[in-house]
């Protein structure tokens, strides 16, 4: 069943139109949106072609767009400089790694490879998915660009899961970040879904029909206020170490290696790969098995069991995956402090866990409604006003928006 139409309010349209007109001195023609995402289960399992439970959220990156009849894509994001990418050169450029032009160029390159007659367009973007928020602003941006190209020039021939794969390609090859596919898929397809990435070219995406608010809990994301800057090596070390474990068995990823074979080889793996790699692999096997248990708990209405599994996930990430505190950090352990605050203000109820990549950014908490006001006040008092965000799940993924009619 398709998601309901996403409408752009008249007020939001006026804001986008004003930004577009100021940048490009003409009127936009169409409007597009891609949501942020929240990872609920499957912490660092996607790059091992494992399972995840994830959802699109009610924060998005949106754009007013107009075809410009040139060979250049020009995008102005509110608060940033104009970004221009020539379509004459759609090859990876190491000098562009970790930049916005790299993402645009990568998405455009893949669409052209698929036969899309990519041409120039102008776009003005505004986003509530703040960079570093842990809700994956980069994936929302990639999905937005892909959705725009698909709608403007390709009659929407590319499916939402394929747009996610294009976004991952852009991030891996053009941006230089070895990410998995969860963020882009959750943003592209929308709603609450479980995804099995074992077949990397055809991930199995299954909707999960569940309303967290019906169980008396709010889904919260807490910003630790730590920066992701200079942490690329920490993130890259996780897939690199797991790849080393897989290489011992002559395989590409851990999903290709039976768990009992891994445990039988632990003595040799400790010598070959080191203890942290072994612990991270232990996390993967446990976490990958936990995702279908979480899905089953939701489908059977066993919410206490679901919360217990969420807490198990958080504990595993902290103890085995070790993506809470960057190696060697002592004075700054922001994510650990945020988790400690969550535990304190939850009073033994709900659940909390590191969210997404880890090391900086955010943590996630399921907070009982009767504790929500005190929880949010306590978190904001310790970490700064607005650190605690209460989210809801968005049914739509990357889409073209319809303009709300005047009443």
Image (cartoon, helix red, strand yellow):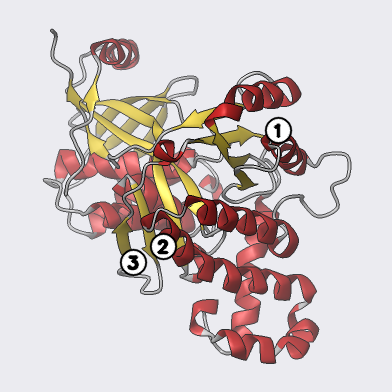
**Residue 391 at least partly seen:** yes
**Left-right relation of 110 to 236:** left
Sequence-first disc among 1 and 3: 3
Q: Quadrant of the C terminus?
A: top left
The relative height of residue 195 versus residue 28 in the rendered view (above or below) is below
* Residue at horizontal 59 percent and vertical 55 percent from the top: 308
Report the disc number at residue 296: 2
- Residue sticking out furthest to the top: 407
Report the disc number at residue 203: 3
Instruction: Where is residue 69? Give x, y as percent.
Output: 17, 31
The relative height of residue 229 versus residue 377 in the rendered view (above or below) is below
Sequence-first disc among 2 and 1: 2
The 10 Å Cα crowd at callout 3, few under 14, some 14 to 19, many 20 or more, is: some
Identify the residue position indicated by label 1 in the image.
Answer: 345
Sequence-first disc among 3 and 2: 3
Please, what secondary structure does the residue beneath circle 3 have?
loop
* Residue at horizontal 63 percent and vertical 39 percent from the top: 361
Instruction: Where is residue 152? Give x, y as percent.
Output: 17, 38
């Amino acid at each position: 069943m398709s998601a309901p139409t996403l409408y752009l309010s008249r007020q939001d349209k006026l804001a986008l139109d004003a930004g577009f007109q100021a940048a490009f001195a003409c009127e936009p023609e169409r409007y597009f949106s891609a949501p942020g995402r929240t990872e609920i289960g499957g912490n660092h399992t996607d790059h091992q072609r494992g399972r995840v439970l994830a959802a699109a959220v009610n924060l998005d990156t949106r754009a007013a767009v107009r075809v410009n009849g040139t060979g250049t894509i020009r995008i102005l994001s509110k608060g940033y400089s104009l970004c221009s990418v020539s379509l004459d050169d759609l090859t990876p450029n190491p000098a562009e790694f970790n930049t916005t032009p790299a993402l645009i160029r990568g998405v455009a390159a893949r669409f052209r490879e698929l036969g899309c007659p990519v041409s120039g367009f102008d776009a003005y973007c505004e986003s509530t998915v703040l960079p570093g928020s842990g809700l994956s602003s980069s994936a929302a941006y990639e999905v937005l660009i892909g959705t725009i190209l698909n709608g403007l020039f390709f009659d929407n021939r590319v499916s939402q899961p394929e747009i996610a794969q294009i976004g991952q390609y852009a991030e891996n090859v053009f941006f230089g970040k070895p990410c998995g596919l969860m963020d882009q898929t959750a943003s592209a397809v929308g709603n609450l879904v479980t995804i099995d990435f074992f077949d990397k070219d055809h991930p199995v995406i299954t909707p999960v029909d569940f309303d967290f608010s019906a169980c008396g809990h709010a889904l919260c994301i807490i910003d630790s206020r730590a920066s992701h800057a200079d942490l690329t090596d920490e993130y890259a070390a996780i897939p690199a170490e797991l790849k080393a474990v897989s290489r011992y068995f002559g395989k590409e990823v851990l999903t290709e290696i039976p768990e009992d074979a891994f445990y039988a080889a632990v003595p040799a793996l400790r010598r070959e790969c080191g203890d942290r790699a072994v612990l991270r692999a232990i996390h993967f096997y446990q976490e990958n098995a936990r995702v279908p248990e979480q899905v089953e708990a939701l489908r059977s209405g066993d919410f206490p069991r679901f919360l217990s599994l969420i807490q198990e996930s958080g504990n595993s990430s902290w103890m085995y995956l070790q993506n809470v505190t960057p190696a060697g950090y002592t004075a700054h352990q922001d994510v650990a402090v945020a988790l400690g605050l969550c535990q304190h203000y939850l009073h033994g109820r709900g659940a909390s866990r590191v969210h997404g990549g880890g090391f900086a950014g955010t943590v996630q908490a399921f907070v009982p409604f009767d504790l929500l006001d005190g929880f949010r006040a306590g978190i904001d008092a310790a970490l700064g006003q607005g650190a605690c965000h209460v989210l809801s799940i968005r049914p739509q993924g990357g889409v073209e928006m319809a303009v709300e009619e005047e009443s």
